[in-house]
Amino acid sequence: MIQFTGVHKWFKQLHVLNDINLRVTPGEVLVVCGPSGSGKSTLIRTINQLEPINEGKLIVDGMDLLDKKTDINKLRAEIGFVFQQFNLYPHLSVLSNITLAPLKIRKTPKKEAEEQAMTLLARVGLAEKRDAYPSQLSGGQQQRVAIARALAMKPKIMLFDEPTSALDPEMIGEVLAVMQDLAGTGITMVVVTHEMGFAREVAHRVAFMDHGVVLEEAKPEEFFRNPQHERAQQFLKQLLSPMH
Amino acid sequence: MLTYQFDWSIVTSGKYFEWLVSGCKVTLQISIVGIVLAFIVGLLIAVMRMSNFRPARWFALAYLEFFRNTPLLVQIFFWYFGSYKILPAAVNDWLNSTNFEFAAAVIALTIYTSAFIAEDIRSGVLSIPKEQMEAARSAGFSFLRSMQYIILPQAVRITVPPLVNQFLNLAKNSSLAMTIGVMELTYQARQVESYTFKGFEAFTAATVVYLALSSIITALVHLYDKRVLNPNRAV
């Protein structure tokens, strides 16, 4: 579904992605973790070309991202992206946030788009907020709407870039619950997160990154019980007992 | 010692009143057409100015520099007298058979004002967080569609106050159209003065009308802003 082969990316002098080789198979849930500045956000943003890569090969849903003939807008329509800061459209109601792309890009009839949006809103537990505006919602509610908005395009792949990092602790659970529910539907997911509980429970595989390199890839039970790389051991230790 | 005899009746009834009314109508027409066109052209130029397509960006830059940095009166003369020299005779014949003074005035005012509107809209767009564009592009919208559905609607909402200024400028600047013979309000007031020597009354009447026009434009935009654009303004 997603295949990185020898991918490099630089921001000026900074080598943010260094020889990434990574494969995500259809239906797989991959969690990417690592310390801040490790390149994990950049990695996930290359998948829908919010960040173009400089070198290597990146195939997403059968399309080569470096091929000039690839229609990036068409590809992006198949990939849902959930941001750390939600990025809902503040001038539109919750319902319109969700229906905008289906109406304008998929040309879905209005009635159908709205019914589908209501189904999604019910699924994330916010059906009663259809006419609210983003500024009237809590962070957790906004993020659930953002997930519904992404799902409205019926994507093949869902990308989550630290979806709970901007949330108050008591709201993290509601968002993770929606994501866990989603993972059960068999959609391909890549999740950048520090929520190790989520990784343990939901991920099929965990990738650990540091300094632009994927240092370790393992099943969650192996990764958490017995991390191979020294940096990964340190990282997990710090996450579990941050006071030390 | 004031010996001037005021005669307000000339501007409230009779032939001269009708001249002023017909001038009002023309001023209103220029203003309405000009404001609508200047807003649309301003949006287009703003988008071109921000696009990644270089020829579009360069065109917009040249447009902005050129039309913001030359006097409006010169631009009006250019469109009216200048274009005449370079257009084919057949086109000129056709233009003369229409109301070319009016068209030239509207074109000049539209282009001049659109350059200022474009810059106001651009600063509005720059104040929208770049993540909005990322969210739109991630959903699969092209640059132009992202602008159309997500960025510009937000930018225009916060650009309302400077836009009102530009609309008012256009309405007031329409008085310059008299210089090419458009029979708008200022032209008619001048006519009344020439025929009656009642300059004080004539231009007072014109002043009152411009003031009313400006107030109406301001009120309409604010009403639209409150009812349609920003019904849930957070502030």
Image (cartoon, rainbow, N blue to C red):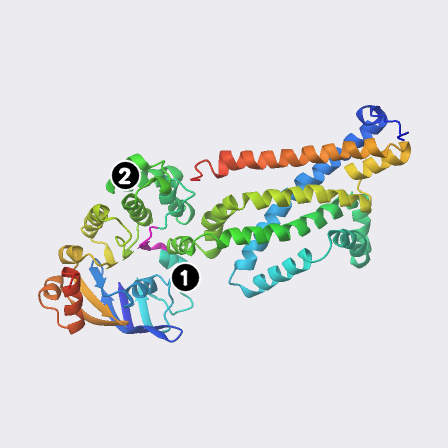
* Position of residue B24 in the picture relative to residue B113 (left or right): right
Q: Residue B161: x, y in percent? A: 56, 43
* Position of residue B34 in the picture relative to residue A25 (left or right): right
* Position of residue A26 in the picture relative to residue A132 (left or right): left
Residue A84 on the magenta segment:
yes
Q: Residue A51: x, y in percent? A: 37, 65
**Quadrant assignment, res B142:** bottom left
- Up the image or down, B158 lies above or below B206; here it is below
Name the element at disc 1: loop
Which chain letter matches label 2?
A: A
Which chain letter matches label 1?
A: A
Q: Is residue B22 visible?
A: no
Query: Distance between the Cα atoms at labels 1 and 2?
Result: 34 Å
Q: Which quadrant, please, contains the C terminus of chain B? A: top left
Q: In the orientation shown, which residue stands out farthest toward the front?
A: B1
Name the element at disc 2: loop
> What amino acid is labelled 1 in the image?
Asp
Q: Which residue is mark 1?
A: A71
Contact flag, marks 1 and 2 (Cβ < 8 Å): no
Q: Residue A118: x, y in percent? A: 30, 38
Q: Which residue is mark 2?
A: A126
Local crowd size for mark 1, using a 10 Å CA cut-off: few (<14), some (14–19), many (≥20): few
Q: Residue at x 24, y 41 (%)?
A: A123
Q: Nearer the viewer, residue A3 or A54?
A: A54
The region drawn magenta spans A77-86
Local crowd size for mark 2, using a 10 Å CA cut-off: few (<14), some (14–19), many (≥20): some
Q: Is residue B26 visible?
A: yes
